[in-house]
Amino acid sequence: MEKKMFKPLILGTVVAAFALASCKKDDNGGSTEPPVDESRWITLSGAIDDPSNTNPADGDAGTMVYSLTAADAKNPSITVNVFNDGMHVKSSRTARLQASADGNFLYNIQYTGDDGGIFNKYSVHGANDFRASGAEVETATYVSSSPRWLKAAEGIGIAVRGTANAVVYEGTSPDFVFKERTAKIDILSLDLNDPKIINTATTAKFSLSEEETAAGYYISRIDVPVVNKAGNKVYIGVAVSKVKPESFTIGTDGTPTFATDNASPKAWAKTIVADYPALTNPTLISSSNTRANTNGYRSTMQYIGTDGNVYQATSGEGYGNGGSKILKINASGNDYDNSYVFSLDAALGLSNTYIETWRYVGDGIGFVVYSLVSSEGERTGGYIARINLNDKTATKYTLPNESSLYFGQIQNIAQNGNDVFIAVAVPGQQGNIYVFNKETGEMSAGAKLGNQTGGQYIGAY
């Protein structure tokens, strides 16, 4: 483990003039469960389609943001259009956005391009008024120009990179013998209140168990870090891939390339656990409840529950393998509680559910955005359900055009007291903000969402 203490890479400081007309707001990031505040900003994000690509609604042309008060977000007589009226966030492709719990600040690490890996902080002032706040921070040196990152705790960002190392083999052509494939793990922590790098750490060779390694499994991606309630561990989601140890082709240079294995069973769900704030001593824990990934895609997939345990959504089980689960990591032992599993399939009476994102809103209640996996392996439709992790039940909502909805790029669900906000629109079509009551489960349609060709609403903050 190579550990680097705080070495800030600051590109420039902008003094933010922070004044709100409607109410006084907390500058320190607020609590993790903010009280009801009708004047609190709700920020919407939208991904812009790149028409030069063959993928419709790919989001590869950047991201727009627009904020309105919680009261306006709940008002169906109001129409907002983030694409026409919002601000373009710095990022050559889809920005990876996070926000403070009180909605006053928006955080971004630019994804790819010349400025990939640059951290920016904005104060939120309504509509398209987002003002640079604090220093820009360069993270690419440690976690690449396209880091995976989250607000891992209030005021703390964690960025990570998992890179598969080259396959290690023995022997001479044509009698090569596969030995292992390991991964390099990089972790970086950020101070979100006073933007700067706090710590970095690197593990050059991180392995799975001997049995899994021999079978060709290896870590291919890591993401969605979260700091536990005690503040002494960080949990990092993991995607595991596999090669075929007995199957390879020999290139013109005489070296073997081992074939990718997508037919074998996936690895059991895993999480990397490292010391916090040091970011050192990474270890691996494994669930026996599902063969799946825990790294998610751009959005938070694990939350600290009211009981202090971490609840983690999985995805990618594949068709016919029981659909997405929510697992529990015990606060006391920092390991999976394999006696607990929430099955979205079982709770809804469905098959092949795929959790795109979710939000834990307190007291064992969550709101899940999911799709369904077809027999061809494609994710279809977009659906929302309220779940109860305590009694393992779920209630599905009925949305307009849900078979045509697509949440593959969704990044965030907002919460303001008992109100939960989800931006819902078919790519390129108009939609609504939907507001859900945490306690009663009641759903109502809020502000209307204008759109443009290929546009996707991907978050509410």
Image: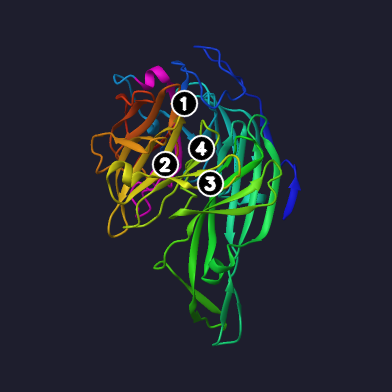
First of labels 2, 3 by sequence position:
3
To which residue does mark 1 refer? 128
Q: Closest to the observer: 199 or 340?
A: 340
**Can the viewer see residue 44 in this picture?**
no
Please name the amino acid that badge 2 sits on.
Answer: Thr
Q: Is residue 298 left or right of residue 180?
A: left
Whether 269 is drawn above or below 20: the answer is below
> Badges 2 and 3: C-beta atoms under 8 Å apart?
no
Residue 9: percent from the left, percent from the top? Answer: 71, 42
Three-letter amino acid code at disc 1?
Asn
Quarter of the figure with residue 153: top right
Residue 4 relative to residue 36: left or right: right
Callout 4 secondary element: strand
Residue denoted by label 3? 111
Q: Nearer the viewer, residue 352 or 43?
A: 352
What kind of element bears circle 1? loop
Crowd tier of the residue under label 4, counting other residues whose Cα lies within 10 Å: few below 14, some 14–19, many 20 or above? many
